[in-house]
Image (cartoon, rainbow, N blue to C red):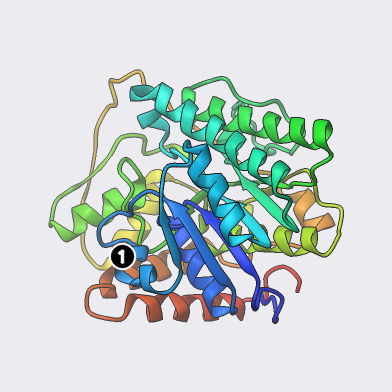
C-alpha cells in the first residue's frame, strides 16, 4: 500500500514505538516524511529499534504509559496531529504471572491515552488491541467485529475491556476513534519472550532443537506490515473526515492459517537447517487452539486486503534475521517495506 504524501510533515505520536510493531511503523512513517514522536519503555536488545538506530531519527521519549502526567505533557509540548496507541503488555502467558501489571498497562494505559485525546483533541487517533479481544469459541468462520469480548485470561480480558472502553469514550464524549484488531503478527526483529518466531530463531542461532508446546494450534499469521497498513489507512481516513470510528479486523487470507508446527517447518526449510522437538505443556496457562479473524468488513468498507502469503512472510522473516547483524538494519527494513508497497494491498 502506498499513501502518497499524506503523512509527509505530519506529527505522529506512537505509543509503544520501541516494540516490534512500533519500530516497523516508525520506519515506515519516517520513509513517508512524517515527524515521529515515540513514547515507550526501553526496547529489546538487537530488535528493530536498536539495530536501526531509531533513537537518533525521532523524538524518543522513554516513559510508562501508566504515567498520566508525563503522557499528557507530550500532548501539550508536541501537539501531535495523529496518535497511534500500541503500548501494551502483549504476552498472553505473561499475563497469568502478572495480571495486575497486564490490566494496569493495557486498560489504564489506554484510558490515559483516551483522556489525553479528550482533553487535547487531535485530528486522528487509532487504538490497537488484538484478535484475542474476542471470546474464543474455536469457530471456523472467524470472528466479526460485533462478536462477544473475552474474559478467558488476563491478557484477552484486558484487550476486550479496552475495546469496550473505547466504545464508551465514543458514546460518552463524541470522540471519533477507530480501534484495530490484528492477528498473530510476525516479521524480522521480534525478540519477545514466549513468542513462536523469536523462540525458533533463538534456537536456530544457538544450534538447538526448536521446542514446540502446541504444535497443532492454528493462528492467523500475518507479516508485520499487513496490519500496519490497516492502522495507517484508518488514521488517514479518520483525518480526512471519513466515518471509521468503530472496530476493525485486519488478518490474513485463509490459506495463511497454518499450524504452529507447519510454520516452524517452513522457517526451518527457508533457514536450511533445524530440528523440532515437541513437549507437553503441563501449566494452566491455556491458549486457544484456533483463532481466525473475519476481515470482510475491512475489505468491503475500507478497501483493505492482505497481499502477502505465508510463504513470502517466511522468506522475509529469514532474510531479516540472517542479515541484521552484518547489514544496515534500517535499510533492510526499508527494502522489505518497498517490496511490500509494490504488492498492491488495499487502496490509496
Location of residue 85 with respect to 78 vertically, above or below: above
Q: In this orientation, does residue 255 appear?
A: no
- Secondary structure beneath label 1: helix
Residue at 48% x, 71% y is 27
Residue at 59% x, 27% y is 136
- Residue 332 point in image, percent of width and height: 38, 78
Residue at 43% x, 38% y is 89
Residue at the far left: name it: 207
Foreground pick, 80 / 190:
80
In the picture provided, is 145 more to the left or to the right than 153?
Answer: right
Q: In this orientation, does residue 78 appear?
A: yes
Q: How many marks?
A: 1
- Residue 176 point in image, percent of width and height: 80, 46
Q: Quadrant of residue 333?
A: bottom left
Q: Which residue lies under the disc numbered 1?
A: 50
Location of residue 13 with respect to 209 vertically, above or below: below
Location of residue 282 with respect to 321 vertically, above or below: above
Foreground pick, 42 / 223:
42
In the picture provided, is 169 more to the left or to the right than 154?
Answer: right
Location of residue 306 with respect to 347 vertically, above or below: above
Q: Quadrant of the C terminus?
A: bottom right
Q: Quadrant of the N terminus?
A: bottom right
Q: Quadrant of residue 166?
A: top right
In the picture provided, is 47 more to the left or to the right than 7?
Answer: left
The crowding category of the residue bearing disc 1, from other C-alpha atoms within 10 Å (few below 14, some 14 to 19, many at least 20), is some
Residue at 83% x, 56% y is 300
- Residue 257 point in image, percent of width and height: 54, 49
Q: Quadrant of residue 163?
A: top right
In the picture provided, is 267 more to the left or to the right than 160?
Answer: left
Foreground pick, 185 / 14:
14
Amino acid at each position: 500500500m502506498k499513501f502518497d504524501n499524506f503523512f509527509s510533515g505530519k506529527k505522529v505520536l506512537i505509543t509503544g514505538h520501541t516494540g516490534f510493531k512500533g519500530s516497523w511503523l516508525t520506519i515506515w512513517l519516517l520513509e513517508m516524511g512524517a515527524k515521529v514522536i515515540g513514547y515507550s519503555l526501553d526496547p529489546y536488545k538487537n530488535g528493530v529499534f536498536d539495530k536501526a538506530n531509531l533513537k537518533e531519527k525521532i523524538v524518543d521519549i522513554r516513559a510508562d504509559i501508566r504515567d498520566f502526567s508525563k503522557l499528557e505533557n507530550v500532548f501539550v509540548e508536541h501537539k501531535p496531529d495523529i496518535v497511534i496507541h500500541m503500548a501494551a503488555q502483549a504476552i498472553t502467558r505473561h499475563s497469568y504471572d502478572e495480571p495486575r501489571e497486564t490490566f494496569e498497562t493495557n486498560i489504564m494505559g489506554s484510558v490515559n491515552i483516551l483522556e489525553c485525546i479528550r482533553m487535547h483533541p487531535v485530528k486522528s487517533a487509532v487504538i490497537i488491541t488484538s484478535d484475542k479481544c474476542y471470546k474464543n469459541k474455536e469457530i471456523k468462520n472467524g470472528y466479526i467485529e460485533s462478536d462477544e469480548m473475552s474474559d478467558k485470561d488476563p491478557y484477552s480480558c484486558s484487550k476486550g475491556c479496552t475495546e469496550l472502553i473505547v466504545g464508551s469514550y465514543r458514546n460518552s464524549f463524541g470522540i471519533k476513534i477507530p480501534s484495530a484488531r490484528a492477528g498473530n503478527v510476525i516479521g524480522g526483529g521480534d525478540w519477545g519472550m514466549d513468542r513462536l518466531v523469536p523462540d525458533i530463531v533463538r534456537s536456530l542461532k544457538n544450534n538447538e532443537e526448536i521446542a514446540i508446546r502446541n504444535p497443532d494450534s492454528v493462528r492467523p499469521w500475518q507479516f508485520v506490515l499487513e496490519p500496519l497498513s490497516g492502522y495507517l489507512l484508518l488514521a488517514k481516513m479518520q483525518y480526512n473526515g471519513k466515518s471509521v470510528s468503530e472496530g476493525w479486523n485486519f488478518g490474513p487470507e485463509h490459506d495463511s492459517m497454518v499450524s504452529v508446527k507447519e510454520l516452524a517447518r517452513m522457517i526451518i526449510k527457508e533457514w536450511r537447517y533445524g530440528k523440532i522437538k515437541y513437549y507437553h505443556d503441563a501449566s494452566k496457562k491455556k491458549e486457544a487452539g484456533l483463532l481466525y479473524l473475519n476481515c470482510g468488513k475491512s475489505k468491503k468498507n475500507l478497501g483493505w486486503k492482505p497481499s502477502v502469503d505465508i510463504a513470502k512472510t517466511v522468506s522475509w522473516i529469514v532474510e531479516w534475521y540472517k542479515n541484521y547483524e552484518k547489514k544496515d538494519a534500517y535499510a533492510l527494513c526499508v527494502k522489505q517495506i518497498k517490496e511490500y508497497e509494490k504488492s498492491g494491498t488495499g487502496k490509496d
